[in-house]
Protein backbone atom coordinates (compact mmCIF):
# COMPACT_ATOMS: atom_id res chain seq x y z
CA UNK A 1 0.00 0.00 0.00
CA UNK A 2 1.12 3.52 -0.69
CA UNK A 3 2.36 5.58 2.21
CA UNK A 4 1.51 9.22 2.89
CA UNK A 5 2.44 11.70 0.18
CA UNK A 6 4.23 14.97 0.66
CA UNK A 7 0.86 16.71 0.24
CA UNK A 8 -0.56 14.53 3.02
CA UNK A 9 2.21 15.52 5.40
CA UNK A 10 1.55 19.18 4.72
CA UNK A 11 -2.18 18.81 5.13
CA UNK A 12 -1.78 17.00 8.44
CA UNK A 13 0.63 19.63 9.68
CA UNK A 14 -1.80 22.41 8.70
CA UNK A 15 -4.65 20.65 10.49
CA UNK A 16 -2.58 20.19 13.61
CA UNK A 17 -1.88 23.92 13.45
CA UNK A 18 -5.66 24.48 13.41
CA UNK A 19 -5.82 25.76 9.84
CA UNK A 20 -9.57 25.87 9.21
CA UNK A 21 -9.30 26.66 5.48
CA UNK A 22 -7.28 23.48 4.88
CA UNK A 23 -9.90 21.50 6.76
CA UNK A 24 -12.80 23.00 4.80
CA UNK A 25 -11.02 22.33 1.49
CA UNK A 26 -10.41 18.72 2.49
CA UNK A 27 -14.04 18.27 3.52
CA UNK A 28 -15.25 19.69 0.20
CA UNK A 29 -12.86 17.54 -1.83
CA UNK A 30 -13.89 14.28 -0.21
CA UNK A 31 -17.52 14.98 0.53
CA UNK A 32 -19.13 13.24 -2.46
CA UNK A 33 -16.88 10.18 -2.27
CA UNK A 34 -17.34 9.76 1.46
CA UNK A 35 -21.09 10.00 1.06
CA UNK A 36 -21.12 7.33 -1.64
CA UNK A 37 -19.06 4.93 0.40
CA UNK A 38 -21.17 5.52 3.53
CA UNK A 39 -24.26 4.66 1.49
CA UNK A 40 -22.91 1.17 0.91
CA UNK A 41 -23.51 0.50 4.58
CA UNK A 42 -26.38 2.62 5.82
CA UNK A 43 -29.95 2.82 4.64
CA UNK A 44 -30.56 6.46 3.89
CA UNK A 45 -28.79 9.46 2.58
CA UNK A 46 -29.57 11.37 5.76
CA UNK A 47 -27.83 8.74 7.88
CA UNK A 48 -24.93 8.65 5.41
CA UNK A 49 -24.51 12.39 5.85
CA UNK A 50 -24.36 11.96 9.61
CA UNK A 51 -21.74 9.26 9.14
CA UNK A 52 -19.65 11.67 7.06
CA UNK A 53 -19.93 14.35 9.75
CA UNK A 54 -18.88 11.85 12.41
CA UNK A 55 -16.00 10.79 10.21
CA UNK A 56 -14.54 14.27 10.15
CA UNK A 57 -14.75 14.48 13.90
CA UNK A 58 -13.05 11.08 14.08
CA UNK A 59 -10.36 12.31 11.69
CA UNK A 60 -9.62 15.36 13.83
CA UNK A 61 -9.58 13.40 17.07
CA UNK A 62 -7.36 10.75 15.56
CA UNK A 63 -5.00 13.15 13.82
CA UNK A 64 -2.22 12.66 16.33
CA UNK A 65 -2.34 8.94 15.64
CA UNK A 66 -1.93 9.35 11.87
CA UNK A 67 1.52 7.98 11.18
CA UNK A 68 1.60 8.15 7.42
CA UNK A 69 1.72 4.39 6.91
CA UNK A 70 -1.12 4.75 4.41
CA UNK A 71 -2.20 7.77 2.42
CA UNK A 72 -4.33 10.28 4.24
CA UNK A 73 -7.16 9.43 1.88
CA UNK A 74 -7.08 5.72 2.70
CA UNK A 75 -6.88 6.52 6.39
CA UNK A 76 -9.92 8.82 6.23
CA UNK A 77 -11.93 6.19 4.35
CA UNK A 78 -11.00 3.53 6.91
CA UNK A 79 -12.39 5.76 9.63
CA UNK A 80 -15.54 6.30 7.60
CA UNK A 81 -16.00 2.57 6.99
CA UNK A 82 -15.67 1.78 10.70
CA UNK A 83 -18.20 4.41 11.67
CA UNK A 84 -20.59 3.34 8.90
CA UNK A 85 -20.35 -0.32 9.91
CA UNK A 86 -21.08 0.47 13.56
CA UNK A 87 -24.00 2.58 12.49
CA UNK A 88 -25.32 -0.18 10.21
CA UNK A 89 -25.17 -2.67 13.07
CA UNK A 90 -27.08 -0.30 15.30
CA UNK A 91 -29.69 -0.01 12.55
CA UNK A 92 -29.90 -3.79 12.53
CA UNK A 93 -28.77 -3.95 8.93
CA UNK A 94 -26.84 -6.91 7.68
CA UNK A 95 -23.51 -5.76 6.38
CA UNK A 96 -23.12 -6.00 2.63
CA UNK A 97 -20.16 -8.26 3.14
CA UNK A 98 -20.95 -10.42 0.13
CA UNK A 99 -21.52 -7.42 -2.12
CA UNK A 100 -17.95 -6.30 -1.47
CA UNK A 101 -16.05 -9.50 -0.80
CA UNK A 102 -17.91 -11.92 -3.04
CA UNK A 103 -19.59 -9.93 -5.79
CA UNK A 104 -19.37 -13.01 -7.98
CA UNK A 105 -21.65 -15.01 -5.68
CA UNK A 106 -24.67 -14.03 -7.74
CA UNK A 107 -23.95 -14.18 -11.46
CA UNK A 108 -25.07 -11.25 -13.55
CA UNK A 109 -24.82 -10.94 -17.33
CA UNK A 110 -23.57 -7.71 -18.91
CA UNK A 111 -26.05 -8.22 -21.75
CA UNK A 112 -29.28 -10.26 -21.67
CA UNK A 113 -28.64 -13.82 -22.91
CA UNK A 114 -31.61 -13.51 -25.32
CA UNK A 115 -29.55 -11.14 -27.43
CA UNK A 116 -27.18 -13.93 -28.41
CA UNK A 117 -27.65 -17.09 -30.44
CA UNK A 118 -28.13 -20.14 -28.25
CA UNK A 119 -25.20 -22.44 -27.35
CA UNK A 120 -26.55 -25.13 -29.70
CA UNK A 121 -26.68 -22.78 -32.67
CA UNK A 122 -25.23 -24.76 -35.61
CA UNK A 123 -23.10 -21.96 -37.03
CA UNK A 124 -22.54 -19.10 -34.56
CA UNK A 125 -23.25 -20.08 -30.95
CA UNK A 126 -22.95 -17.14 -28.56
CA UNK A 127 -22.85 -14.54 -31.33
CA UNK A 128 -25.20 -11.58 -31.49
CA UNK A 129 -28.72 -12.28 -32.63
CA UNK A 130 -29.74 -8.69 -31.84
CA UNK A 131 -26.56 -6.72 -32.09
CA UNK A 132 -26.17 -3.22 -30.68
CA UNK A 133 -27.02 -0.39 -33.05
CA UNK A 134 -24.67 2.60 -33.24
CA UNK A 135 -26.02 5.58 -31.31
CA UNK A 136 -24.98 8.18 -33.88
CA UNK A 137 -25.62 11.07 -31.55
CA UNK A 138 -23.72 14.29 -32.17
CA UNK A 139 -21.16 15.19 -29.54
CA UNK A 140 -23.08 18.12 -28.05
CA UNK A 141 -26.15 15.93 -27.57
CA UNK A 142 -24.09 13.10 -26.09
CA UNK A 143 -22.59 15.34 -23.47
CA UNK A 144 -25.78 17.37 -22.96
CA UNK A 145 -27.99 17.52 -19.89
CA UNK A 146 -30.56 14.96 -21.05
CA UNK A 147 -28.07 12.15 -21.67
CA UNK A 148 -26.23 12.99 -18.45
CA UNK A 149 -29.58 12.69 -16.67
CA UNK A 150 -30.05 9.17 -18.04
CA UNK A 151 -26.61 8.16 -16.78
CA UNK A 152 -27.22 9.81 -13.43
CA UNK A 153 -30.49 7.90 -12.87
CA UNK A 154 -28.93 4.64 -14.02
CA UNK A 155 -26.17 5.08 -11.42
CA UNK A 156 -28.72 5.93 -8.70
CA UNK A 157 -30.51 2.67 -9.36
CA UNK A 158 -27.41 0.50 -8.97
CA UNK A 159 -26.86 -1.61 -5.86
CA UNK A 160 -24.81 0.49 -3.40
CA UNK A 161 -21.44 -1.27 -3.83
CA UNK A 162 -21.60 -0.98 -7.62
CA UNK A 163 -22.75 2.60 -7.30
CA UNK A 164 -19.84 3.49 -5.03
CA UNK A 165 -17.25 1.89 -7.32
CA UNK A 166 -18.49 3.49 -10.55
CA UNK A 167 -18.80 6.88 -8.86
CA UNK A 168 -15.30 6.81 -7.42
CA UNK A 169 -13.74 5.50 -10.61
CA UNK A 170 -15.68 7.12 -13.43
CA UNK A 171 -17.21 10.27 -11.91
CA UNK A 172 -14.52 11.24 -9.40
CA UNK A 173 -11.71 9.75 -11.51
CA UNK A 174 -9.91 7.77 -8.80
CA UNK A 175 -7.35 5.16 -9.89
CA UNK A 176 -8.36 1.53 -9.28
CA UNK A 177 -5.79 1.08 -6.53
CA UNK A 178 -7.22 3.90 -4.42
CA UNK A 179 -10.72 2.49 -4.72
CA UNK A 180 -9.43 -0.92 -3.59
CA UNK A 181 -7.73 0.70 -0.59
CA UNK A 182 -10.65 2.89 0.41
CA UNK A 183 -13.20 0.07 0.17
CA UNK A 184 -10.85 -2.70 1.23
CA UNK A 185 -11.57 -4.57 -1.99
CA UNK A 186 -9.44 -6.96 -4.01
CA UNK A 187 -8.51 -5.79 -7.52
CA UNK A 188 -10.63 -8.52 -9.04
CA UNK A 189 -13.71 -7.65 -7.01
CA UNK A 190 -13.27 -3.99 -7.77
CA UNK A 191 -13.32 -4.86 -11.47
CA UNK A 192 -16.36 -7.13 -11.13
CA UNK A 193 -18.32 -4.33 -9.46
CA UNK A 194 -17.13 -1.77 -12.00
CA UNK A 195 -17.99 -4.10 -14.88
CA UNK A 196 -21.53 -4.67 -13.66
CA UNK A 197 -22.09 -1.00 -13.01
CA UNK A 198 -20.75 0.12 -16.38
CA UNK A 199 -22.67 -2.59 -18.22
CA UNK A 200 -25.94 -1.41 -16.71
CA UNK A 201 -25.27 2.23 -17.45
CA UNK A 202 -24.47 1.34 -21.07
CA UNK A 203 -27.72 -0.60 -21.25
CA UNK A 204 -29.69 2.39 -19.94
CA UNK A 205 -28.18 4.55 -22.68
CA UNK A 206 -28.90 1.90 -25.29
CA UNK A 207 -32.57 1.83 -24.23
CA UNK A 208 -32.69 5.60 -24.33
CA UNK A 209 -31.27 5.86 -27.85
CA UNK A 210 -33.40 2.95 -29.07
CA UNK A 211 -36.61 4.77 -28.15
CA UNK A 212 -36.12 7.33 -30.85
CA UNK A 213 -35.72 4.87 -33.67
CA UNK B 1 4.28 -21.09 -35.36
CA UNK B 2 1.56 -19.96 -33.00
CA UNK B 3 -1.40 -22.20 -32.39
CA UNK B 4 -4.65 -20.91 -33.85
CA UNK B 5 -6.56 -19.55 -30.87
CA UNK B 6 -10.05 -20.62 -30.12
CA UNK B 7 -12.47 -17.92 -31.15
CA UNK B 8 -14.15 -15.80 -28.55
CA UNK B 9 -17.93 -15.58 -28.84
CA UNK B 10 -19.67 -12.21 -28.64
CA UNK B 11 -21.33 -13.30 -25.41
CA UNK B 12 -17.90 -13.99 -23.90
CA UNK B 13 -16.45 -10.77 -25.24
CA UNK B 14 -18.98 -8.48 -23.56
CA UNK B 15 -17.98 -9.96 -20.20
CA UNK B 16 -14.32 -9.13 -20.85
CA UNK B 17 -14.77 -5.50 -21.89
CA UNK B 18 -13.94 -4.03 -18.49
CA UNK B 19 -10.86 -6.22 -18.05
CA UNK B 20 -9.82 -5.15 -21.55
CA UNK B 21 -10.35 -1.42 -20.95
CA UNK B 22 -8.60 -1.72 -17.57
CA UNK B 23 -5.57 -3.36 -19.18
CA UNK B 24 -6.13 -6.43 -17.02
CA UNK B 25 -6.36 -9.07 -19.75
CA UNK B 26 -3.41 -11.43 -20.15
CA UNK B 27 -1.64 -11.00 -23.52
CA UNK B 28 -3.20 -14.02 -25.15
CA UNK B 29 -6.73 -13.06 -24.13
CA UNK B 30 -6.14 -9.53 -25.30
CA UNK B 31 -5.07 -10.85 -28.69
CA UNK B 32 -8.22 -12.96 -28.98
CA UNK B 33 -10.29 -9.99 -27.91
CA UNK B 34 -8.77 -7.71 -30.52
CA UNK B 35 -8.96 -10.33 -33.26
CA UNK B 36 -12.64 -10.75 -32.57
CA UNK B 37 -13.23 -6.99 -32.58
CA UNK B 38 -11.50 -6.60 -35.93
CA UNK B 39 -14.10 -8.77 -37.64
CA UNK B 40 -17.25 -8.18 -35.61
CA UNK B 41 -19.36 -5.06 -36.15
CA UNK B 42 -21.68 -5.83 -33.25
CA UNK B 43 -18.85 -6.09 -30.74
CA UNK B 44 -17.04 -3.05 -32.16
CA UNK B 45 -20.21 -1.05 -31.65
CA UNK B 46 -20.53 -2.49 -28.15
CA UNK B 47 -17.00 -1.49 -27.11
CA UNK B 48 -17.48 1.92 -28.69
CA UNK B 49 -20.69 2.38 -26.67
CA UNK B 50 -18.86 1.38 -23.52
CA UNK B 51 -16.21 4.04 -24.19
CA UNK B 52 -18.96 6.59 -24.82
CA UNK B 53 -20.62 5.55 -21.55
CA UNK B 54 -17.38 6.22 -19.68
CA UNK B 55 -17.05 9.61 -21.32
CA UNK B 56 -20.58 10.66 -20.37
CA UNK B 57 -20.15 9.34 -16.82
CA UNK B 58 -16.98 11.42 -16.56
CA UNK B 59 -19.05 14.53 -17.26
CA UNK B 60 -21.24 14.08 -14.19
CA UNK B 61 -20.63 16.39 -11.29
CA UNK B 62 -19.88 15.09 -7.84
CA UNK B 63 -22.32 16.07 -5.09
CA UNK B 64 -21.14 19.27 -3.46
CA UNK B 65 -20.96 19.89 0.27
CA UNK B 66 -23.87 22.14 1.19
CA UNK B 67 -23.07 25.47 2.85
CA UNK B 68 -24.98 24.30 5.98
CA UNK B 69 -22.94 21.09 6.23
CA UNK B 70 -19.74 23.04 5.70
CA UNK B 71 -20.70 25.50 8.42
CA UNK B 72 -21.40 22.61 10.81
CA UNK B 73 -18.03 21.08 10.03
CA UNK B 74 -16.21 24.37 10.53
CA UNK B 75 -17.96 24.68 13.88
CA UNK B 76 -16.83 21.18 14.84
CA UNK B 77 -13.31 22.08 13.74
CA UNK B 78 -13.24 25.14 15.99
CA UNK B 79 -14.52 23.13 18.93
CA UNK B 80 -11.83 20.55 18.32
CA UNK B 81 -9.22 23.28 17.91
CA UNK B 82 -10.17 24.84 21.23
CA UNK B 83 -9.93 21.53 23.09
Image (spheres, rainbow, N blue to C red):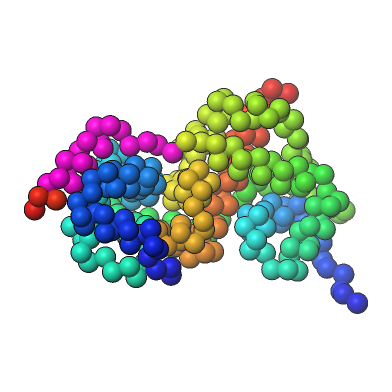
* Among the 4 quarters of the image, the one containing residue A35: top left
**The residue positioned farthest toward the left in the image shown:** B83
Q: Check the picture and name the quadrant holding the N terminus of chain B.
A: bottom right
- The spot of residue A57 in percent (x, y) is 20, 51
Membership of A167 in magenta stretch? no
Q: Is residue A119 above or below residue B59?
A: below
Q: Is residue B6 left or right of residue A109?
A: right
Q: Residue furthest top?
A: A212
Measured as percent of width and height from the top left, residue A79 is found at 28, 58
Which one is nearer the viewer's eye here, A112 or A44? A44
In this figure, what is the number of numbered marks?
Answer: 0
Q: At 66% from the left edge and 44% from the top edge, which residue is drawn?
A: B50
On screen, residue A202 versus residue A69, left or right, reads right
Q: Majority secondary structure of the magenta segment?
A: helix
Res A203 quadrant in image: top right
Left or right position of A143 against A120: left
Q: Which residues are magenta?
A: B62-79
Residue lying furthest right: B1
- A211, A26: nearer the viewer: A26
Q: Is residue B67 magenta?
A: yes
Q: Judge whether A140 appears above or below B18 on screen.
A: above
Q: Position of residue A116 (x, y in %)?
A: 74, 47
Front in this rendered view, residue A212 or B38 = B38
Position of B37 compared to A22: left or right? Answer: right
The answer, for residue B77, to whether it is visible in the render is yes
Which residue is outermost to the bottom? Answer: B1
Q: Is residue A60 visible?
A: no
Residue drawn 71% across the image and 47% down it: B47
Residue at the image point whose x is 67% and y is 64% from the top: B25
- Residue at 28 percent across and 69 percent down: it is A67
Percent x, y for residue A128? 78, 46
Amino acid sequence: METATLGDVEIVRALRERDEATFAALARDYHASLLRVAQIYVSSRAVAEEVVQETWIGVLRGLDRFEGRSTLKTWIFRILTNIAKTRAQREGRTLPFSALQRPDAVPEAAVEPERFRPPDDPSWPGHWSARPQPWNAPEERLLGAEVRGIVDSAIEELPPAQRAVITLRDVDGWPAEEVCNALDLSETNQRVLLHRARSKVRRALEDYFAEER
Amino acid sequence: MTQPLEQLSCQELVELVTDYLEGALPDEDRRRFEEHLATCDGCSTYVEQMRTTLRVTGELKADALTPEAEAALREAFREWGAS
